[in-house]
Amino acid sequence: MIAEVIVDVLSSEVDKVFDYIVPSSLSADIGVGYRVLVPFGNRQIEGYIISLKESSDYDLSKLKPIIRKLDNYPLIKPEMVEVIHYMKDKLYLRLLDGVRLSVPTQVRSSIKDKVESIISLDESKAVDYLSGLSARNKVAPRVIEYLRQYGAVKHTYLNQKFSSSVVKKLIEQGVCIENKQKVNRLKHKSRMDKQIVLTDVQNQAMKQILASQDKPIVLYGVTGSGKTEVYMHVIADVLSKGKTALMLVPEISLTPQMVGVFTARFGERVAVLHSALSVGEKHDEWMRIYNGEAQIVVGARSAIFAPLDKIGVIIIDEEHDSSYVSDSSPRYFTQDIAKFRALYNKCPLVLGSATPSIETFYKTTTGEYNLATMPVRVNNKPMPPIKIVDMCTEFKLGNTSPISSCLMEKLDKTIKDGNQAILFINRRGFSSYMMCRECSYIPKCTDCDANLVYHKNEGVLKCHFCGKKFRALTKCPNCGSDSIRMGATGTQQVVEFIKDKFPDVTVFRLDNDSVTTKDAYSRILGEFASTKPAVLVGTQMVTKGHDFPAIQLVGILDADISLFNYSYKASETTFALMTQVAGRAGRDQINGEVVLQTYVPRNPVYLTCANYDYSKFYDKEINLRKTTQFPPFASIVRILVTSTEDDVAKACAHDIIMELKEYRVKYGKDFIFMEGMKSPVGKIKNKHRYQIVMRFKTDILDGVLQEIYTVLDRKKNKKTSIFVELNPTSLS
């Protein structure tokens, strides 16, 4: 028997399957998905069997045998083998990329199960032991009495409470029985809450989802309409049929909150997968899923690769969110993998959002996707009014602070009312850069083509691409001037400003700099929830998924940050962000209000946002996309070439574009656009970046992609890395 094996060497030059002979000693207990040790050159390395066959196209005398299997079970299940091939064929990922996404490092490494020693009592031996015990021995009877009262107890706890030497002697005498048992490093709630009765609108949405077996369904519901409760009812129905469920949220920071909701309802049937787990925790959770101990997986983007069997529903909450796109290697779009797995399992794929992406909603109009709508909040409260403030006028009136007079007035009222406010600014740090007023010098990262951001709390300049830190400027290194000005305002500066204006009010900050530990996110939000009055300042982390009853005011400090981004999706992203953060206000009994600060108050995005008019925004945007031939009417393909040597990356990109020109001639008008250039961020982590951006009519995409991939395969070399992105959210 011959095994086709993917070897664990992350190089494009060996990104193929290799044939190995299966020794007769292994043929009975080895199969597809097993991890094995194989000879490779003069080394012995790990590999993964992805196929078995009776014969090989190669000379059998030149094939080497598998040395041994490394596990007693296949790490890669049949469904995930199919996913790996799909990602290779459609997304231009290496086979090993797919393997490593399907079997994370924490599972591939030699992590051992956590074992706990539990002590119980042998009552008959305890009676005999006590009868012959000296009256001077006071501790042993107390240990025995404690075990009689509480049953099985942790060994470590008994040692701490009494005496390790006494406990050890009781074990040796057979009075106490020691049992070793596996325990999970991540603790889950066992309490299960009762289901909430759905409203008529929610119930109708649930029925539509369960009936949508043939195509994805978009759950379009305003913020506060109760989408999460619908998700949980759908999952309960799926579990009752002996199937499993996959629930994705857009950011790691949202996962603990969603996990809390789900474990309160479903208890230990829930497992968690995201990159913030410790090595041991991820290992334990993955194994619980693999072994069927958990039937519901809640997690961020990477959870789409969870080893679930018999999936009954896949849910992507906030489906419009850009975090579902992996923009670093390996690059993939979560929705693509979700569609493949939903089709494989013949189950519904739910795409939930208050602001669906343009491409997603367009597919509901063409019949490619089904649509379920939830147009009102569960409590029937209206959405909070949004007031647009012109910051140009504020500046002319002498207000140079980040807070307009209107927002300051409403913030003062909110605090006096004893309620809470959220201030959203999508820029972390104290200021976006430091600049010399004399010579205009701006410090940049030595490893990346990016301005350094000033972080006042740490007193450093930090690169937001690679994380490298530098000493903050006191004098210009270029001309020696000490006249240094700050760039645009960040979260730290806003916090400092609010504390100065309202010294008696507690101000919380929620961004990547404040959430530095696994529990920091939950801790900050927990403290904010129990503090009134209070102000929460944050980046995108504050825009979605939160339900605080005392939020009276939401302030959007610089709405234009996302509007003028380097992306064809800038308007869509801005509308979604503004709508999401506005929806945090007035969700309970308190009437909420929103202040949106901008330098372009007449921009159509803000005017539709002020009325929560997604339909009008969609109509304008879809017409613009059709006129300009952008997705969904065309597909964008971005080829990114990187290398530690600038000339090498540039030459490789040039060779690729010269070969691709013949396809532009071949496809004529269907090949809309092609341009090669240095990436806007020309260097990240000491790797120079060049890109080729193309646009095609969507109906020729599959054919063109295969031809592009063939060209790229010919251009691979040891000094460059080549990546492909389909409809990237950013071209930077």
Image (tube, rainbow, N blue to C red):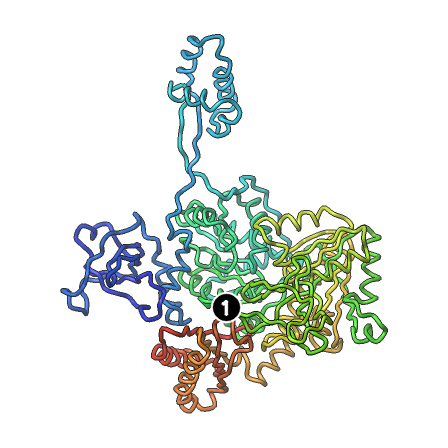
Q: Residue furthest right?
A: 397
Question: Under tag 1, what secondary structure?
Answer: loop
* Residue 222 placement (x, y as % from top left): 66, 62
Judging depth in this view, the residue of 632 and 439 nearest the camera is 439
Find disc 1 in the rendering and name its residue: 685
Left or right: where 410 falls relative to 439: right
**In the rendered image, the vertical position of residue 371 relative to residue 234, given as above or below:** below
| Residue 11 percent location from the top left of the image | 35, 67
Q: Can residue 105 be spotted in the picture?
A: yes
Q: Is residue 133 above or below residue 349?
A: above
Q: Nearer the viewer, residue 318 or 428?
A: 428
From where the camera sits, is residue 373 visible?
no
x and y, in percent, of residue 606 in the image: 72, 73
Q: Is residue 470 left or right of residue 334?
A: right
Q: Can you tell which quarter of the image residue 443 is in?
A: bottom right
The residue nearer to you, when weighing 447 against 182, is 447
**Does residue 232 lie above or below 128 as drawn?**
below
- Give percent across and percent down for residue 711: 36, 81
Left or right of 349: which side holds 383?
A: right
Q: Residue at x 62, y 75 (%)?
A: 565
Instruction: Write the residue at 33% across / 61% down.
Output: 8
- The amino acid marked with disc number 1 is Lys
**Quadrant including the C terminus:** bottom right
Q: Quadrant of residue 652?
A: bottom left
Mark 1 crowdedness (10 Å alpha carbons): few <14, some 14-19, many ≥20? some
Locate the N terminus by quadrant.
Answer: bottom left
Image quadrant in which you'd find residue 172? top left
* Closer-to-camera residue (366/350): 350
